Amino acid sequence: MANYATHIAVGTVVSGALATLTVGADVVGPEDIMAVTLAGVAGSVLPDIDLRDSRASTILFSGIAVFTSFCVLFINAENYSIAELWVIWLGSLVFVRYGLHALFYRISVHRGVWHSLLAGVFWAGLTAVVFHDLLGRHQGVAWLGGGFMFIGYLTHLVLDEIYAVDFMGNRLKASFGSALKFIDGRYPGHSLSMAMLTILVLVLAPSPKPLVEAVSSPALWTGLNERLLPSGKWFGLIGARGDVATAKQQGSSPITTGSIPTPSALPASGSDASVPN
């Protein structure tokens, strides 16, 4: 299988390429593009959380432990003394980081259900829930983050399968087929549990309708096609510079705030009258 550095490098390239298309298509504003891109990079290493002592697993459980401990701290802030809160915070941090971490490895198998498309859908739905319910992002932005997460996850699985092919020896390694699969047929109980968790997060997730409408808009694809290649020579040396200058003279900008709105985005009064005909 590919190593951690390779997964991070390829995941970053894929997520960066998708982010460039997203910005070029004006789907979301600059304030959201970094978050959805990081979701894609995270997805490119998450399948290895079932690998004992892997970097992905350590980072994931450390992050969950910090997040959970502070949630417990804030919930009980008015009920206990400072000394008691220190004990509660540290106890919950250690319990999640080491207790749940150890329990996870007792019930998980490497290249098991976490190396499956079903797990990718689970993480995509969970990402949408976190973006919408915890970070307060718009429904479309939440599911865009979920989409980036799934593509990053899929990138990891495909890369592992590519590394399972011995091109020099013209043969398939024993690990071929164990990374990219829909479910883990070896452990039906694990797959059933993952299916139930996936259904749960999809029920809790926001509606994907705003993202579907934005991505399926003919205007979006027309604009993306027009911006895909430079109108003159590359990097605006000839032709494209004039287009940018014309856009500035007309009071418009090549990149706007995004066709998927943010919760705080409110229409400015009289904005139509301020744009010259």
Image: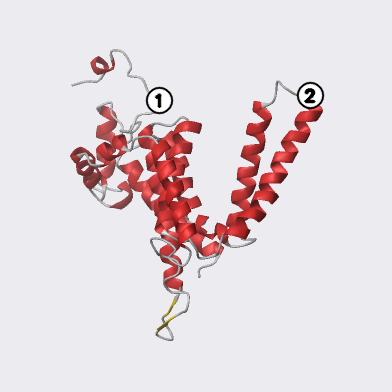
Q: Which residue is mark 1?
A: 263
Q: Position of residue 99 (x, y in %)?
A: 69, 50
Q: Residues within 10 Å of mark 2 (few under 14, many from 20)?
A: few
Q: Position of residue 240 (x, y in %)?
A: 26, 44
Q: Position of residue 80 (x, y in %)?
A: 75, 24
Q: Residue furthest top?
A: 270
How many numbered circles does the render carry? 2
Q: Quadrant of residue 50?
A: bottom right
Q: Secondary structure at mark 2?
A: loop
From what the image shows, is residue 7 above or below residue 75? below
User: For the residues carrying marks 2 and 1, which lies nearer the camera in this image?
Assistant: 2
Frontmost residue, 267 versus 1: 1
Q: Residues within 10 Å of mark 1 (few under 14, many from 20)?
A: few
For the residues marked 2 and 1, what is the alpha-carbon distance in whole angstroms? 37 Å
Q: Position of residue 249 (x, y in %)?
A: 26, 28
Q: Residue 81's mark?
A: 2
Q: Is residue 144 left or right of residue 90?
A: left
Q: Secondary structure at mark 1?
A: loop
Q: Quadrant of residue 168?
A: bottom left
